[in-house]
Amino acid sequence: MKSFRILHHYRSSWWLALLGLGAGVASSMAADTNSTPASVPELTPQQMFEGGTNVFNNWIDLSAGGFLTHGNKAQAQQQHQNSAGAFGGIEDLHVQGEVSKGTTFTLDGHSIFDNHDYDLGLGLSKEKLGYLRFSISEFRTWYNGDGGFYAPTGSYYRGADEALGLNRGEISFEGGLTLEKMPQVKFKYTHNFRDGDKSSTSWGLTHPDTDVTRSISPSFHDISEHSDTFQLDVTHHVKATEFGAGFSYQTGKLEDSLKIDQFPGEPVEQKITDRQQTSYDLFNAHAFTETWIKKDLFLSTGLSYSDLDNTFSGSRIYGSDFDVNYVPAAQNGFGYYGLTGGSRLDEYVMDVNLMARPVGHLTIVPSIRVQKEDTDASFTGTETLSDNTTTPFNGNSNRGMLDVRERLDVTYNGFTNWVLYARGEVTEGNGNLTENGGLVQINGIGVPPIQRETDDSRFFQKYSIGARWYPLRKLTIDVGGYYKLNDYNYDNNIDSTPNTSANRYPAYLLVQNFETYDGNVRLTLRPAQTVTLVTRYEYQISSIHTRPDPITGLQEAESSKMTSHILAQDVSWAPWTRLYFQAGFNYVLSDTRTPTSDYTQAILKAQNNYWTLNFTTGFVIDNKTDLNVGYFYYLADNYQDNSSSGLPLGSGAEEHGVNATLTRRLTKHLRVSLRYGYYHYDDETFGGHQDFYGHLVYTSLRYRF
């Protein structure tokens, strides 16, 4: 991507120079206002803690540090979102000042080299006229690209030593007119991009044992995306009504691919490149109004229309390397090339909200939202399998849907020391889906093209209720809960896939509903002025009921049931103005049962039980020095080695770490900080191959002016 490469090439040079230039300009602007008198009175402890009697509006933080890792470096980078070695630069910069009467210049930014974390913002505002803003930013997200683990043989499929990196960035320019008694106008241009690699769990096949095939070979997404957005919004206030209207136009291109290493290190090793390319244009027009009809009656409305046009292409090609042309080979699985097509979406949305206070302590807010969508798509391509003759395929689909959501919110605080609230929400929807074509059979192998016409309806309900009670001056109790039921009904008018065959999903479903009960209580207690206790408990039970087509011979069943208990406790204590303690504990019990897990060891009951502990303390050693120390602990003990019967499920991991930061105020202008961190991670799920421990050493210097 050209824009990303240009930014990447120049960021280490002109970026730092520009930040330094802004700091110098603003320093000269602020010199007069921040000058210190010849005779300085003695500072109080509070003033010394804050840096003096003057207000310093500008500062720059310079920092340097490093993360030293032993063990799985990629997992450590993903866990802590840091580079694996040294990093540093400008951690934070803020400059502001008047360039002329009523005109303010601002500069904000940071530039952390080798952490790929950069940001620069420039602003210029004129009172009663308008503003201009420019910003540019980039940051990296790290992902562990390792594959899976097969316990019986201890086979582990490692990716690269370093973590995969995906860079995200944005360049924007914004300007606005804020003239008094005139329409407010805002224009904004934004360029966004993503570029790099990201891990995937769509792992490739491999043979960790002679007679065993498992999908645990590593794969990754190769991502290159960019978009440009233009926005114009106008708002105006007339008497009791605020009006607004605007439009936006976005155009973008996505060039992504999933790259799978299949059977690594074996004679039949293959590289699979699954490429997806999309170009799109998105147009949106919207408008809103907000009106105080009376002092106790408020009405707001909104309208939006969106039009999305896509053009896409793609291929799935097997070869001896990634990004190669198609060559027939006996070991190739199903693939395709020359995929081209297009799609279109039209969306209409309307919102109406009314807030009324019929009596002094009662607030009622009814609202309605209507959403309509129409989509259609078509495609063609060429299918491949092994070294057979290639076969063309094509298909098309269209979808229409209409949803109407009605909601009512009620709040009452007429009882002494009580606040009561309730909400009821109902969504009714219907739609239709037509599908024709798709992949074809080659030499009788594979899935034949489909023909389906499905009418569907949806009915969603959610009811919430709660109360806040202040029985004592130092005690608050919050109680609440909700009930949610989502019903889906399907009428499969045409279905070319027999519901007694293996290829029957999803047209064999007639009814499916998702039901959830949730209750929670929160207690906040202040037994002493310096102590606060917060206790929270939540219970949730969710179930899924499924009714298939009677021709399948299957009965309606509770296809899964999940039960969760969440307990949290937080404590804050400040026994002295120079000292405070904070501690938190969370315990989660959660398991999911399915009918299959009751009858076979191949699929176990899924569990997601874990608990966390964190502790923080701060101590002001003297009027110039303070110390902060933190500790955290995490444990999930749900891993079950089920490799001999089926797929191992659950997570088994333990992590703990400690952080300590010492800050010293050298002068009213200078502060220096030193931070140390130690982290240790053990992962049972991957047989210890993702274990690591690391040390973080970090120092920063802040100059305020």
Image (cartoon, rainbow, N blue to C red):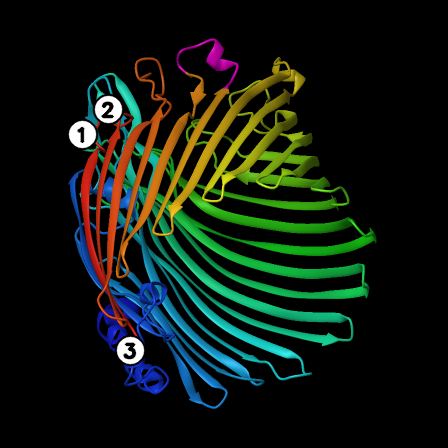
Residue 473 point in image, percent of width and height: 61, 41
Q: Amino acid at mark 2?
A: His
Q: What is the span of residues highlighted in magenta in the rendered image?
A: 593-602
Q: Amino acid at mark 3?
A: Leu
The reply to whether callout 2 and callout 1 are in contact (CB within 8 Å) is yes
Which mark is nearer the camera, 3 or 1?
Answer: 3
Tell me the CA gap for discs 3 and 1.
53 Å
Question: Closer to the camera, 517 or 568?
Answer: 568
Q: Disc 2 or 1, which lies upstream in sequence?
A: 2
Residue 300 placement: quadrant: bottom right
What kind of element bears circle 3?
helix
Question: Closer to the camera, 283 or 550?
Answer: 283
Tell whether 13 sits left or right of 412. Answer: left
Mark drawn on residue 18? 3
Residue 407 placement: quadrant: top right
Tell whether 620 sits left or right of 492. Answer: left
Q: Amino acid at mark 1?
A: Glu
Instruction: List the residue tagged with mark 2.
Output: 207
Residue extending farthest to the bottom is: 100
